[in-house]
């Protein structure tokens, strides 16, 4: 099979990209891997090219001055770092190896540094730099993403590390205890869809539920956190019906790991609505998963894309949709047939018309690639 024969070449590419950055020449080399792979086996997908693309982009992100934070750390982003961490674990399952590579280790060390130095590190965005309440929003957002990344790592090892336990302690300390948002966390709002808006607070809480449900050793059943876990479940159920489908799909995923996060009716309603939005080519469009408008007035891309199709097919598989369901089969087939030569999958910004070849323009491609990987790896 193509995917195993390419391991040596992809490993060399990953090492070179991590050491030397991810400029145009690097991505041309990635394109060569994908083109040769597609010629060998057009009915499957190229794990090695996807790995190389994701490693290159995460290495670039951690070296990008704009992403730099104090103590030699970098911002843990929703578009690149967090999905990278989830997908890289999935890519390591099976014959591709069991130990994190250099780029993944660097990200994990970055997160651990920020967890262990929590009181000393600066927030990603402070009130002084921007405006209140950016400090509290940053802390709440980071607490969720740190716990998610480390719990995802520990789930593979089967043991909850002390640093991950500390990350969860930070998480629970920042949970909103009362009011309309009881059970959620302060969450960054820069009016950027779909992750940094007022509505994205629900998305963040769903990711927190994924983290709790993923943590090994029965962490979610720990007696000392049951009040907080019950509060989180109640928030997700209470607010679910007000959310756009993008948020509810994330909650559907969460409910497969933390039972009780949605009720049976809510789960089925999400699945039914999702099927209705499937496009004729088998994929889904991110623009269809909510009521979105670009700030620059340009029209949204409405064709099928890798982010929506990856998220949908991953969540539906996790929710127990039968592997031979024709609709799921068609969605996964769309993913297999739309991996680009550089190993990535396409997606477009919901906020403005960006140059897809630019580094900022690739943010949506980063998250699309990660979720396509999660879906295809789940399908085995």
Image (cartoon, grey):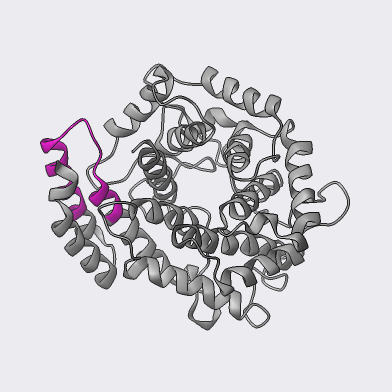
On whether residue 30 falls in the magenta region, the answer is: yes
**Main SS category, magenta section:** helix
Q: Is residue 224 visible?
A: yes
In the rendering, at what x and y percent does residue 186 appear?
73, 57
**Residue 343 drawn above or below residue 13:** above
Residue situated in front as seen by the camera: 128 or 327: 327
- What's the magenta region? 28-51
Which quadrant of the rendered structure holds the C terminus?
Answer: top left
Q: Residue at x 41, y 48 (%)?
A: 370
In the rendering, at what x and y percent does residue 232 appear?
74, 49
- Left or right of residue 10: residue 158: right
Q: Quadrant of residue 62?
A: bottom left
Residue situated in front as seen by the camera: 45 or 125: 45
Residue situated in front as seen by the camera: 272 or 27: 272
Residue situated in front as seen by the camera: 172 or 84: 172
Task: Tally the numbered discs.
Answer: 0
Q: Is residue 299 visible?
A: no
- Left or right of residue 143: residue 360: left
Q: Residue at x 57, y 73 (%)?
A: 163
């Amino acid at each position: 099979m193509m995917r195993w024969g390419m391991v040596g070449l992809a490993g060399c590419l990953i090492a070179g990209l991590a050491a030397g950055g991810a400029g145009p020449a690097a991505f041309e080399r990635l394109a060569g891997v994908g083109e040769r792979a597609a010629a060998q086996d057009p009915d499957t997908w190229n794990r090695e090219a996807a790995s190389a693309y994701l490693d290159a982009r995460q290495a670039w992100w951690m070296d990008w001055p704009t992403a730099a934070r104090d103590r030699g750390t970098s911002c843990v982003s929703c578009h690149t770092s967090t999905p990278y961490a989830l997908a890289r674990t999935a890519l390591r399952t099976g014959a591709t190896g069991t130990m994190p590579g250099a780029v993944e280790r660097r990200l994990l060390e970055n997160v651990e540094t920020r967890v262990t130095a929590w009181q000393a590190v600066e927030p990603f965005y402070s009130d002084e730099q921007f405006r209140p309440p950016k400090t509290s929003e940053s802390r709440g957002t980071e607490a969720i993403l740190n716990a998610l990344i480390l719990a995802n790592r520990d789930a593979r090892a089967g043991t909850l590390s002390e640093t991950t336990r500390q990350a969860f302690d930070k998480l629970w300390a920042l949970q909103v205890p009362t009011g309309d948002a009881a059970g959620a966390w302060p969450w960054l709002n820069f009016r950027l869809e779909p992750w940094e808006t007022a509505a994205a607070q629900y998305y963040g809480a769903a990711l927190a539920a994924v983290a709790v449900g993923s943590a090994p050793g029965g962490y979610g059943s720990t007696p000392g956190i049951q009040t907080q876990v019950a509060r989180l479940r109640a928030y997700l159920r209470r607010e679910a019906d007000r959310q756009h489908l993008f948020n509810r799909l994330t909650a559907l995923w969460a409910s497969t790991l933390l039972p009780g996060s949605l009720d049976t009716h809510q789960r089925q309603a999400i699945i039914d609505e999702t099927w209705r939005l499937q496009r004729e080519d088998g994929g889904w469009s991110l623009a269809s998963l909510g009521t979105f408008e670009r700030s620059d007035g340009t029209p949204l891309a409405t064709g099928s894309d890798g982010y929506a199709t990856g998220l949908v097919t991953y969540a539906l598989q996790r929710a127990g949709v039968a592997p031979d369901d024709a609709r799921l089969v068609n969605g996964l087939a769309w993913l297999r047939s739309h991996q680009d030569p550089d190993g990535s999958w396409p997606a477009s910004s919901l906020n403005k018309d960006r140059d897809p070849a630019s580094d900022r323009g690739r943010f949506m491609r980063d998250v699309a690639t990660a979720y396509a990987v999660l879906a295809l790896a789940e399908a085995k």
